[in-house]
Image (cartoon, grey):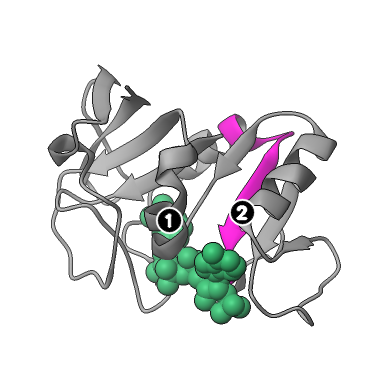
């Protein structure tokens, strides 16, 4: 499984249940990378998706609520159950958030695809700082680009050592 995340300079990822930065190029890349695979997400991230389940992907929602059920998603009550569902679907498996899932299951990921925005914004949800973690190494970083609102960003790839 690989993780994918959009962060600000201090590894902020969200506020009030929503994302911090709007970035069309990042959304496009997220779609391209995850299309055809399984996306594992926490119940809160799922409920924040503006259009419901992500089309063309196996949406697996992690919740401790055994009664949680909705059309277009698979429900798992543990990461092992989620990974079994993802294996059965085939294709690549992506951990797509939010903060609590990243925190708990990053160790199970081989790579993290980070979109790093060079800005600090008021956040209440954070990704672990991979630059301060010896278990992770930055292996690729793109040239700086700009969001539609002029925020500089780069795509950064980390590998689990
Ligand atoms: N920037 C990004 O790339 C990115 C990506 C995704 C999310 N986000 C942001 O992250 C924030 C949400 O993160 P969050 O930490 O509050 O919520 P979350 O991780 O999306 O969801 C948390 C929920 O997942 C379920 N859960 C967590 N661990 C579980 C486990 N071990 N077993 C079973 N169920 C488990 C629980 O659901 P129940 O309460 O139903 O039991 C828990 O309340 C939002 O601001 C969102 O916008 C940002």
Relative to 14, residue 150 above or below: above
Magenta-colored stretch includes residue 6: no
Q: In this view, does 64 lie to the left or right of 122?
A: right
Mark 1 surroundings within 10 Å by alpha-carbon count, few (fewer than 14), some (14 through 19), many (20 or more): few
**Quadrant, the N terminus:** top right
Q: Position of residue 35 (x, y in %)?
A: 68, 35
**Quadrant, the C terminus:** top left
Relative to 110, residue 148 above or below: below
Dot 1 and dot 2 residues touching (CB under 8 Å): yes
Callout 2 secondary element: helix
Q: Can residue 57 be seen in this view?
A: no
Relative to 126, residue 140 above or below: above
Q: Which of 74 and 107 is in front in this view?
A: 107
Figure disc tally: 2
**Sequence-wise first label, 1 or 2:** 2
Rounded to the nearest angstrom, the CA distance separating label 1 from label 2 is 9 Å
Residue drawn where x is 72% and y is 62% of the image: 76
Q: Can residue 79 be seen in this view?
A: yes
Residue drawn where x is 26% and y is 40% of the image: 116
Task: Say which quarter of the image contains residue 86.
Answer: top right
The answer as to whether callout 1 falls within 8 Å of ligand 1 is yes
Residue drawn where x is 82% and y is 38% of the image: 89
Part of the protein shown in magenta: 33-45
Residue located beneath label 1 in the image: 104
Task: Say which quarter of the image contains residue 133.
Answer: top left
Q: Position of residue 71 (x, y in %)?
A: 86, 68
Q: Where is residue 69 in the image (x, y as percent from the top left)?
A: 81, 75
Residue located beneath label 2 in the image: 79
The answer as to whether callout 2 falls within 8 Å of ligand 1 is yes
């Amino acid at each position: 499984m690989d993780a994918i995340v959009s962060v600000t300079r201090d590894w902020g990822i969200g506020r009030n249940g929503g994302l911090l930065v709007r970035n069309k190029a990042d959304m496009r890349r997220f779609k391209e990378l995850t299309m055809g695979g399984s996306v594992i997400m926490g119940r809160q991230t799922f409920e924040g998706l503006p259009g419901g389940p992500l089309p063309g992907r196996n949406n697996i929602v992690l919740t401790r609520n055994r009664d949680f059920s909705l059309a277009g998603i698979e429900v798992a009550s543990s990461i092992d159950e989620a990974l079994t569902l993802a294996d059965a679907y085939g294709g690549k498996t992506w951990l797509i958030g939010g903060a609590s899932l990243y925190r708990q299951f990053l160790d199970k990921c081989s790579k993290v695809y980070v979109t790093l925005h060079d800005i600090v914004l008021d956040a209440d949800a954070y990704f672990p700082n991979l630059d301060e973690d010896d278990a992770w190494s930055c292996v690729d970083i793109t040239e700086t680009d700009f969001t539609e609102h002029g925020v500089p960003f780069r795509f950064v790839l980390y590998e689990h050592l």
